[in-house]
Amino acid sequence: MRRSSLWGVFALFWLATQALASPAVEPPPEGFAISSNTAILCDGTVTETEEFHWTYFEGTGNLKAVTDGSDAAGHPIITAPGFQEGAEIVYEQDFRAVDGTPLRLRSVPGYYTLFAKDFRATSHGIPNLAVRQTIGYNADPAGNGFATHTEKVGLSVVSSGGGGAVSIADGLLSLCPWAANGPGGETAGYPATNEGIAAGSSFTVTSIQGFTSETEVTSTEIPVLAYAVEAQSGHGVIRAGFVVELWEGAAQWGSHDTGIHDPAEYPTGTYAIDDPPAVQSRTSYAEHATAQGVWTLIKKVMYQSVMPDAGGQNAIRPFVSVP
Amino acid sequence: METRHRKRLQEKRVLTAIRPALATLTFLSLAFLLSAAGEARAQAVAADPILPCCPFQKGPRFESRVNADAFDGAQSVTQSYYDLIQRYDPRDPNPDKLPVFLAEIDYSLDASLAEGNGRVYNSISSLPFRPGGPRFKGDTSMSADYFGLAASLVADEQFSFSGFQGNPQQGSAIWGGMEFSTELIRGNASSHVQFDTVTRQFEGSYLGNAVGAAEIAVNVGEVSGETGVNSSSQSYSGAISVEGDYEVRYTVSGGPSGGGPFCGW
């Protein structure tokens, strides 16, 4: 390795949209918890893959509602209620290592490949997804050894909006008529939103030392996605990316009683779906980093929704802002 | 989504209902062929009292253990277990009613030594319903070439489970499967699987320190839903493959976490 050619990529990024983003999506009554722990030392070939998908919905609304026909105004008529909000968390990871020379590990001399991972996912705990990885690998210079790795994490939250006040203020200020987000007035609530966030990294190397990655995703409280990847040294190609897409409507996506169906008691009755609200805000962000050759890489990204929520740190609390 | 979910649950119930028998517990086979020392034992006793979420007032208890050692020879060890549990709501007068509790466990181990020294120890047990108690548990320990003779020990262990609780308005189901494949030339490997039909918690682990190869595959899924209120679908899969001189430690566990209201009927 030519020390003089060592160059690095450093990136630290934190993103919190200032526009109103998506709300927390409550977990189902009977959720799940899964944890796995993996530790591998190998002189030979190693492959390891892991996938996790969680999609869930809550409340009563237009999302995934079953419709049949339309009213006089052309609005689809709901025959089976859908959901108010939905969220999805996706994690995929793939690792493969072939051949190599022994790692310079004092505790485990003679092993070529090191792989360790701690995975936890749960519907009733924060964060809902947490993954930590450690990888080390050296290829045999006399052979054709290589190691490849890809890790991706995504969070999507879709809301048809909601009525009622969702206060961003605290204490007496919560009575302020402007304290609730949304269209205001007696039906103050929050508008329809759609946000998707994804982060990940990949490498193809003949050697990599001190590679670590940390992933955290939350959707059952204020939506958060955080991803950090670090490689102390490597030879080959390494990539890391971060993408955010956010839509926000002008109002909630509601339903109205057309009066043509009986009974008209939602959700047992049938209602017509209003036209979707106009898009009021559109946020798009993407960044990609690539290092090729001999490198050091550090990249940390985080996205946090600022949708007001109970106990959220976004609450307006002037009292706690002074000594 | 809700309609699809209910349809899926109904399909699962129907598929189960048409199974040849409603026998609650079947212990299929226990056999081993060997040119080595071995031991096998099975016993059944009547069970613990009924619990709020338990489908039966009586339940069987099974235990089976196989210890097989082969010295410069060949041996084969097989174990299998199958368990199907269904419970119907006694308050429902419908003669064609569907089960409101359903659980299924399927386990098998197939290990064979072609040459050299090899050891296969396996125990499986199915215990009656009790709080926190494992409904099924399987443990396997294998080693090869422990006297320095060349060995070739191949084993395949498969475990699948499913559990459903609910009614047409709300319910949840979990299912999963694990497979551990081992090829030992030298070294040790052990595995553990467990599923509790009451809590529907599962466990699996594989530890290997050997020269040879190992493959681990895990798939787990869960759905839950309540009419017009919420719906959830989750899946997890993991796969590991190593070949050469390796050390592998893998554990996985999980199950429902919210405590759900589905035991109240």
Image (spheres, helix red, strand yellow):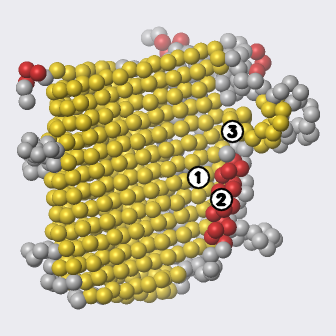
- Determine whether, in the image, residue A190 is placed left or right of residue B247: right
Measured as percent of width and height from the top left, residue A197 is found at 47, 28
Secondary structure under tag 1 reads strand
User: Residue B146: percent from the left, percent from the top?
Assistant: 13, 74
**Do labels 1 and 2 touch, CB within 8 Å?**
yes
**Three-letter amino acid code of the residue under disc 1:** Val
- Chain of the residue on which disc 1 is drawn: B
Relative vertical location of residue A262 with respect to residue B134 in this rendering, above or below: above
What residue did someone put label 3 on?
Answer: A64
Query: Residue at image x 85%, y 40%?
Result: A269
Front residue of this view, candidates A32 and A208: A208
Question: Within 10 Å of the Cα at label 3, are there few (<14), some (14-19), or many (20+) other Cα atoms?
Answer: some
Whether discs 3 and 2 lie on one chain: the answer is no
State left or right for residue A143 relative to residue B131.
left
Q: Nearer the viewer, mark 3 or mark 1?
A: 3
Determine the image quadrant of residue A56: top right
Quarter of the picture holding the C terminus of chain A? top left
Chain for numbered disc 2: B
The residue wearing badge 1 is B223
Give the vertical position of A53 relative to B25 (above or below).
above
Residue A304's spot in the image, x, y percent?
A: 47, 24
**First in sequence: mark 1 vs mark 2:** 2
Kind of residue indicated by mark 3: Lys
**Mark 2, residue position:** B9
> What is the C-alpha distance between the residues marked 3 and 1?
17 Å
Disc 1 from disc 2: Cα separation: 9 Å
* Dot 3: element: strand
Using the image as rendered, state which of residue A16 and residue B30 is in the foreground: B30
